[in-house]
Amino acid sequence: MKNFEIKLMLPTEEHRRQVEEYKQKFIDFPSEIPGVTIHGCGSLSTQSFDSWLQECNDHAQGKNLPDEYVPATQFLAIRKSDNKLVGTIQIRHALTPHLSRIGGHVGYSVAPDERNKGYAAQMLKLGLGECRKLGIERVRVSCVKENAASANVIKKCGGKYDGDAEHDDKVLERYWIELNS
């Protein structure tokens, strides 16, 4: 397992090539699960790296937030053994009614070629640590109903099922994770 350990890092210019390759992997290998796209990376799928990086920095500081957005910190999941980007995770500092219903505090994704190696569970566990630092005691996480792998990760990290919600012709499973201080 040691070769599969990860660390969370804030994105910087030095990650440009890896982030662009990560984005391309989701274009080249779309999910077979309806509604599953590149999650946990803000607007990376629709922006250039430079615009995305600026947005990440702004949103972490609560600057230039579109209506209905909350401050959010973007992390890259980097494999320690070779410093390779294997996933992304975004921690939203608060919930709006919309995020409480269908999104949550945490969004994450793992590169298509790096799945089934335990990264998602590590990312979520590390992300929950970041939630604790922000003073979040009850963390909302959701996933597309057909994404059993993600649901299992959420449950493995303490997620308690809290019903379904429909959004954009998808059914989302919603969970709460209680963080005991």
Image: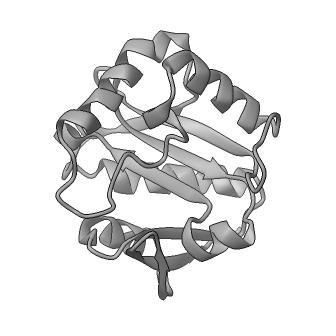
Q: Position of residue 171 (x, y in %)?
A: 39, 78
Name the residue at the front extreme.
169
Image coordinates for residue 18, horizontal then vertical, percent: 36, 19
Choose between 74 and 54: the one closer to the eye: 54
Q: Is residue 47 above or below residue 165?
A: above
Question: Is residue 123 shown above or below 94?
Answer: above
Is the residue 157 above or below the residue 115 in the image?
below
What's the residue at 45%, 16% (across, down)?
15
Q: Residue furthest bottom?
A: 163
Instruction: Give the residue drawn at x 50%, y 40%.
Output: 41
- In this view of the protein, can residue 165 be seen by the observer? yes
Colour option used: one colour
Q: Dividing the picture into quarters, in which one does residue 103 lie?
A: bottom right
* Residue 180 visible to an observer of this rendering: no
Assign the N terminus to one quadrant of the image.
top left
Instruction: Tell whether 134 sits left or right of 164.
Output: right
For the residue pair 35 and 25, the one nearer the viewer reads as 35
Where does the C terminus fall, quadrant-wise? Answer: bottom right
Asked where in the image residue 64 lies, by quadrant, the reply is top right
94 vs 70: above or below: below
Report x, y in % for residue 70. 75, 52
Q: Residue at x 28, y 68 (%)?
A: 147
Q: Which residue: 39% across, 74% down? A: 169
The count of marks equals 0
* Percent x, y of residue 163: 49, 89
